[in-house]
Image (tube, grey):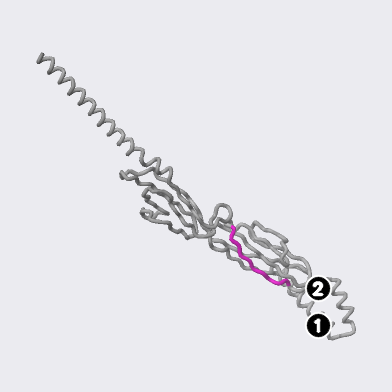
Amino acid sequence: MVRNHILWKGLFCGIVVLLVGMSITSMVGSLSIEKEQSVIPKSCLDGINLTGTMGQNGWYVSAVTITFVGENATRVFIDGGDWFYYTGPFVVGTDGYHTLMWYYIDHWGGHSDYFSIDFKIDATLPLITLMKKITGINEVTFIANVCDATSGVWRVEFYLDDELNFTDYDFPFKWNWTGSGIHTVTAQVFDIAGNSASKSKITPYIQSQSQTSSSVQQNSQNPLQIYQYLIYNLILHHQIEVKLFQD
């Protein structure tokens, strides 16, 4: 009888210990799983926003504001600098290519995989100067000297009195104009990011043949005006010959 009582008591204690052990194991296991999985779901819910003025061909044409969305602590690294903790939106305004890296830290001290994103900024207008050169009778060549330090030159558009006449995609950027009268020629340069700048020049006044004949007829009775006209044409033609000889 005593022996049976001891056996039952031992069996009961064994069952209690087993149940307690299973409970503890389950709790530890669940804590382990929670710790292991705590980063991934939260990092998936987190995100990053880049805000700025988007130009052409994937270039921002303004400073870019970077904002992280979510509850995880975040460590950030940009363009070879030092790692720092994200505390609020920050701005990147330097022209050029940028690489942003980051990772999330959970409440257990573990961290997620590394993430990265590239972006590029060109917020500076290209530079342009415009030259004109007489290259023949009633013909002038307009040459645009352009440069862009970051994204590069894309094209130059040439306008005659606000009307687009020619687009040049290759260096040297130039346009040959043939005509008479006084007009405004504008060259507008675009960089690859979409920024633009322009310069304008006035065409030299060159009389057409019909205007010349008419002028001679109208001034045939005035020797002084005929003399002035001949001197003007002599100077103009001499300039043309010198230009052609130099070229």
Give the magenta range. Answer: 194-203
Camera-nearest residue between 128 and 35:
35
Q: Earlier in the sequence, mark 1 or mark 2?
A: 2
Is 91 positioned to the left or the right of 240 in the image?
Answer: left
User: What secondary structure prevails in the magenta region?
Assistant: strand
Disc 1 secondary structure class: helix
* Residue 70: in magenta span: no
Residue at the outermost front position: 1
Which residue is the site of mark 1? 228
Residue 62 position in % (x across, y down):
52, 60
| Residue in the image at 62% along x and 68% along y | 129
Residue 217 placement: quadrant: bottom right
Task: Identify the secondary structure beneath mark 2.
Answer: loop
Q: Position of residue 174 (x, y in %)?
A: 68, 62
Q: Residue 165: x, y in percent?
A: 73, 61
Q: Tell whether label 2 touches label 1 (CB within 8 Å).
A: no
The residue indicated by pointer 2 is 207
- Badge 1, how many Cα within 10 Å: few under 14, some, many 20+? few
- Residue 202 belongs to magenta span: yes
State the quadrant of the C terminus: bottom right
